[in-house]
Image (tube, rainbow, N blue to C red):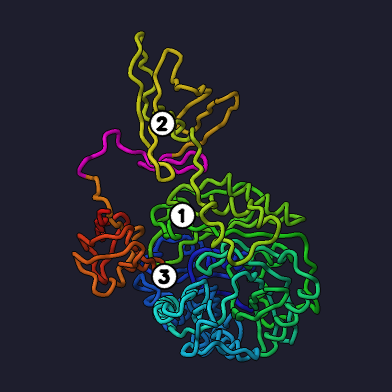
Amino acid sequence: MISTVLVANRGEIACRIFRTCAALGIRTVAVHSDADAGALHTRVADTTVRLPGAAPADTYLRGDLIVKAALAAGADAVHPGYGFLSENPGFARAVLDAGLTWIGPPPDAIEAMASKTRAKRLMGLSPLDEAAVTDADLPVLVKAAAGGGGRGMRIVRHLHQLQAALEAARTEAASAFGDGEVFVEPYLEHGRHVEVQILADTHGTVWPLGTRDCSLQRRHQKVIEEAPAPALPDALIQELHALAVRAARAVSYVGAGTVEFLVADGRAHFLEMNTRLQVEHPVTEEVFGLDLVAEQIRVAEGHALDTTPPPARGHAIEARLYAEDPAHDWAPQTGTLHHLAVPAGVRLDTGYSDGDPIGVHYDPMLAKVVAHAPTRAEAVRKLAGALERAAIHGPVTNRDLLVRSLRHEEFTAARADTGFYDRHLPELTAPAPDAHAPLAAALADAHGRSRFGGWRNVPSQPQVKRYAMAGEEHEVHYRHTRQGLTADGVRIVHADAHRVVLEADGVQRTYEVARYGDQVHVGATRLTALPRFPDPAAQLAPGSLLAPMPGTVVRIAEGLTEGAAVEAGRPLIWLEAMKMQHQITAPVTGTLTALHAEAGQQVEPGMLLAVVQETSS
């Protein structure tokens, strides 16, 4: 029997595994980088071990240090979670060689399936020869052979872009997984990403646990997932189950895993097998009433599964909440997560608690929010409503995008595919702020700073406050009168430092207000308080390129120097943050009049990188 588990991972997955272990009476050990020294997963574990450094290559990708930590802490088992070393057969062997129990599939099975190229050959498929790709093969997808999560992937639509895509994918894959191997395969424009969760024991039983649809993706990383996959014919579901079981049996698989497919024109195209637990596993748990982590532990202890899995019930849907700005190339955001809370009735899996910092070293996912209901329509409505009412105070997130996606007609009708955001991102990210949010912020601030009162018998100048909201500045006017605070066109029913009730056109709305320095949250709207009189010295020259997030300058365009002519849209600077590369492009056609960025430089949000002066017409 397993008594102590070390989780070779971080964030929400480590916290989720620790919860299951605690329920089973199993002690837990957390490993952490210096950047994660105070992270939530270290606070909920029974024991912690430091991995010196911050970069994944120095910490969570160091299997030797993790095995050493397990032995030092007295653990008798290791759970890899997902990401990092979870699909590394060498790490699995090192755990077993140290006399520890590996809560995962056999190393040989990982080796056979963790490389997507080997997995395809095992299933009778072959990648394209990158040297032989022609225009007739386009579009193609460049894909990392190891790992997952959308890293090391690039769509190529023009042949001249192939080599650059291969190089960028190799660099990103090596950084994220320690393996720079990539391959090329055909890209299906309008396919659905459908997968089958499997669970296998050491006695020959393999459970296909239904289907999941994970078609809504950004940068090839899943955003919304659901189980079961909607609107699939029964015959196709049975085929998917059979193919998943076939893949598992082909490598004598043990434990939890996922077989992924692209479904197009009623056919299933094998993509890969993930030899680990998936981020989206909670939707399967909710539908089948299982704890997959507990089942993984039971399988690792040698217990047999029942002959058949439990029956499925209802529908579950999960949204990944990210600290990122979808309207600006999904730029990751950093800062402090001041407060995160969702309404009762939905599941929240997170690696953060109030006041935790969101750093630059790891994936910007804050939480997974999961809803379960008897029908798909009810589950979708439940999740959208919970996200809309959630309190998320901190950096910009993708919350509004998630709510709009869930309510989009194409999604509610189960017609969405992997091109959903390519088609609809502008409409899903168009600003739609609450026009009265700045007034609510100003009134709450007036009370919070004890400035309420001081009315005069003669008319006085209105109080003025300025806020940035959805990329625009808003000026608010209100007055102190004998009747209290007043504002034109709106009746102020109630106002205090945390709650404001306004009435406009006979309709009353209540606003919950929270302020953290200059950052103000009014319900689901995020604002920034601005000084009444802007500092002229802070004005930037037109064409200034600012760092959109903290990160590292990994590349400057070849031959780029001050005085160079550039065309609008040309990539000038490459930043790497949270394991992803981001391009800074020329905003206009003109001349590069200043270049402050250097390869290897660490930058902070808002730092001036370059200036492009537009060519006069």
Task: Please report the residue visible at 32 percent of the width from the left and 61 percent of the height from the top.
Answer: 586
Residue 442: mark in rendering? 2
Q: Most extreme residue toward the top, as rendered? A: 457
Question: What is the three-letter code of the residue carrying label 2?
Answer: Ala
Range drawn in magenta: 515-537
Q: Position of residue 297 (x, y in %)?
A: 64, 76
Whether residue 593 is visible to the viewer of this picture, yes or no, is: yes
Q: Is residue 491 above or below residue 18?
A: above
Task: Please report the residue visible at 53 percent of the width from the left and 69 percent of the height from the top.
Answer: 220
Q: Residues within 10 Å of mark 2 (few under 14, many from 20)?
A: many
Per the model, the C-alpha gap separating discs 1 and 3 is: 20 Å
Q: Is residue 302 left or right of residue 617?
A: right
Is 26 or 97 nearer to us in this picture? 97
Instruction: Please tell me whether mark 2 sits on a helix, a strand or a loop.
Output: helix
Per the model, the C-alpha gap separating discs 1 and 2 is: 26 Å
Per the model, the C-alpha gap separating discs 3 and 2 is: 39 Å
| Quadrant of the snapshot with the N terminus | bottom right
Question: What is the three-letter code of the residue carrying label 1?
Answer: Ala
Q: Position of residue 365 (x, y in %)?
A: 49, 61
Residue at the disc numbered 1 = 327
Is 370 or 226 nearer to us in this picture? 226
Q: Position of residue 456 (x, y in %)?
A: 35, 11
Q: Residues within 10 Å of mark 3 (few under 14, many from 20)?
A: many
First in residue order: circle 3 vs circle 2: 2
Residue at the disc numbered 3 = 579
Question: What is the three-letter code of the residue carrying label 3?
Answer: Lys
Q: Quadrant of residue 193?
A: bottom right
